[in-house]
Image (cartoon, rainbow, N blue to C red):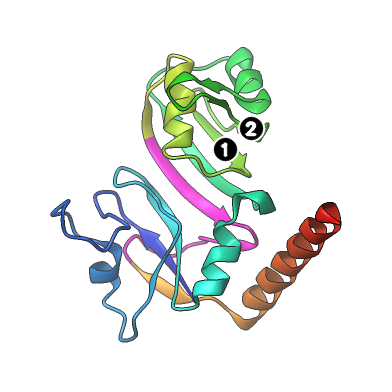
Amino acid sequence: MLAVNKPRGVVCTTSDKDRAMNVVELIHYPARVYPVGRLDKDSEGLLLMTNQGDLANEIMHAGNFHEKEYIVTVDQPFNSAFIKKMQEGVELKELNVTTRPCKVKALGKKTFQITLTQGLNRQIRRMCEALGYHVVTLKRVRIMNIHLGRLNTGDYRRVTPQELEELQWQLEQARMEREEEES
């Protein structure tokens, strides 16, 4: 499994309909790997890539409530009411859904950290727009226990054996919880 720092302008799909560079072309890895989930073209940051389909599906399964953490900058200063609304969940009329409660922490006047357990299409951008803000930059810095760290934009690294062991343990815990709820 690889941890990739996807730059803005690169797509996660492997089709060529967009005509933008895709992440597989970017890293030019010698074995066939594909992205675990998505990070839209205008976003940057941590993207996991693997050739293990079962592992990818487990990570992406929304019912597992896996955490994904982002640093977001918006176009205007926000206040505590904005943070509170983001934390409680935002109604996204176009998707006919209210987002799950999440963790949000102000990092500056226009920048915040947000941790989601849900992965709706362009979720953070839609949440901000619903509250009257426009996302200027969006960077994913963590997926579950795997952190972007100081990985340079456009570079990748192998996930360490310790990270992979912890990831698999977390996935197993989620699987056991799901099975318990179903019985």
Residue at 29% across, 69% down: 24
Q: Are marks 2 and 1 in contact (CB under 8 Å)?
A: yes
Asked whether, in this view, residue 100 is left or right of residue 29, the answer is right
Q: Residue furthest left?
A: 19
Range of magenta residues = 137-154
**Is-magenta flag for residue 4?**
no
Residue at 60% across, 50% down: 62
Relative image position of residue 129 (x, y in whole percent): 42, 21
Q: Amino acid at mark 2?
A: Lys
Q: Amino acid at mark 1?
A: Gln
Q: Say which label, 2 or 1, has the lower sequence index.
A: 2
Relative image position of residue 166 (x, y in whole percent): 71, 72
User: What is the spatial separation of the Cα atoms under label 2 and label 1, in whole angstroms?
Assistant: 5 Å
Residue 143 vs 54, above or below: the answer is: above
**Is-magenta flag for residue 145?**
yes
User: Which residue corresponds to mark 1?
Assistant: 113
